Amino acid sequence: MKPLIGVGMVGYAFMGRTHSQAWRNVTAFFDLPVTPSMAVLAGRSRERAAAAAAELGWAAVETDWRELIRRDDVQLVDICTPGDSHAEIAIAALEAGKHVICEKPLANTVAEAEAMAEAASEAAARGVRSMVAFNYRRVPAIALARRFVAEGRLGEIRHVRAQYLQDWIVDPEFPLVWRLRKEQAGSGALGDIGAHIVDAAQFVTGQLLTGVSAITETFVKERPLAEDADGLSGGSRTGGRGEVTVDDAALFIGRFDGGALGSFEATRFATGRKNALRLEVNGSRGSLAFDFEAMNELWFHDETEPDAGFRRILVTEPGHPYMEAWWPPGHGLGYEHTFTHEVRDFLAAVAAGTDPSPSFQDGLRVQRVLAAVERSAANDSRWTPL
């Protein structure tokens, strides 16, 4: 019998469902030194939390996340709540000696992220681990792209182009869910999906952004109010309307500390695009390109083969990142597998007593980019160093 590690999860909506599936199936596919036990789920409504726990596989329910942290059967806390509560929950859990995995973006402000990173550093000195959940790092094709860059196959990195395109709020009558309220979400497309492409670009290139020039726009200024709405879908309309207080789209250019130039676009108004996280990196010896809407493919160009152009790599071979645990070659993975990989990596680090990646410090770096984008956009797109 392998040691059990009790998991307590706070939140049970979209991210809670994806994380739950990862906790349920990670040991069925990966040989880990510990076994996660889905001990308790926390939500404000006992009735709804109990229904979610029964559906998702959690053994018990709490209506106060503080009680979840106090439980002796919880050694690891998984935070799947809106960003306005990340800092309070994470810091309390770390101070209580609980390992923490927290959804992205790390926080709603740089000050909150700094406090979280400091708490994580202090906890690490006591053997308590933490990680921010940038799940797209765990797409096998993106992990393979990182390997290619680290091996020098692209040479000197010169250009990075990153986009995250969705269309789920194109309809002006889509209700005013929490993701469209600054006090809960921190920002709009910028923090929700822009954070992902900032992290992916920095992860794949191994370089950090040093400054940005940005514009943002809110296309629909008011939306219908609704009861029982979650972050991605609406409930019953109340008849009133409320102000949208976040951006609908953010575009910015940036410089990396290794000399590369970057362009970034995050929007939830790209009609017809459902989840198009795209990344292209151009180097002196080659290029690579990725689109999450074809997530099992990586396109690669080797400059030593100038007549070949880009070639498609089907990232399903046993030697590709994470693929040794899954299906025969040619059998693709899906969105949910990225969370299983994330949980696998976190549990392995906790068991080994090593610091997992991306760390809270990595999350803070992304938060500083988001803040610089907002400052630049508010200041006529002026160049804004980090």
Image (cartoon, rainbow, N blue to C red):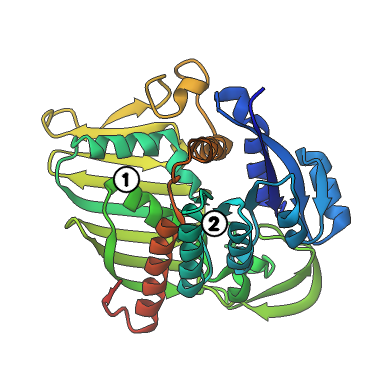
What residue is pinned by disc 1? 204
Residue extending farthest front: 126
Instruction: Describe residue 287's horizontal placement relative to residue 18 as left or right.
Output: left
The residue positioned 80% from the left and 44% from the top of the image is 53
Which quarter of the figure is the C terminus placed in? Answer: bottom left
On the image, the x and y values in percent for residue 111 come to 48, 74
On the image, the x and y values in percent for residue 254 come to 27, 64
Mark yes or no: residue 2 visible: yes
Mark yes or no: residue 268 visible: no
Instruction: Determine the secondary structure under disc 1.
Output: helix
Q: Is residue 100 above or below residue 145?
A: below
The residue positioned 72% from the left and 51% from the top of the image is 12
Instruction: Describe residue 167's horizontal placement relative to residue 295 as left or right.
Output: right
Mark with earlier residue (2, 1) = 2
Q: Tell me if mark 2 has few (under 14), some (14-19) or many (20+) residues whose alpha carbon lies within 10 angstroms of its own.
A: some
Q: Tell me if mark 1 has few (under 14), some (14-19) or many (20+) residues whose alpha carbon lies within 10 angstroms of its own.
A: many
- Tell me the amino acid under the disc marked 2: Asp
Instruction: Determine the secondary structure under disc 2.
Output: loop
**Residue 283 has which mark?**
none
Quarter where residue 372 is shown: bottom left
Which of label 2 and label 1 is nearer to you? 1
The residue positioned 31% from the left and 78% from the top of the image is 381
Between the residue at mark 2 and the residue at mark 1, the CA separation in whole angstroms equals 26 Å
Residue extending farthest top: 328
Q: Is residue 241 above or below residue 60?
A: below
What residue is pinned by disc 2? 167
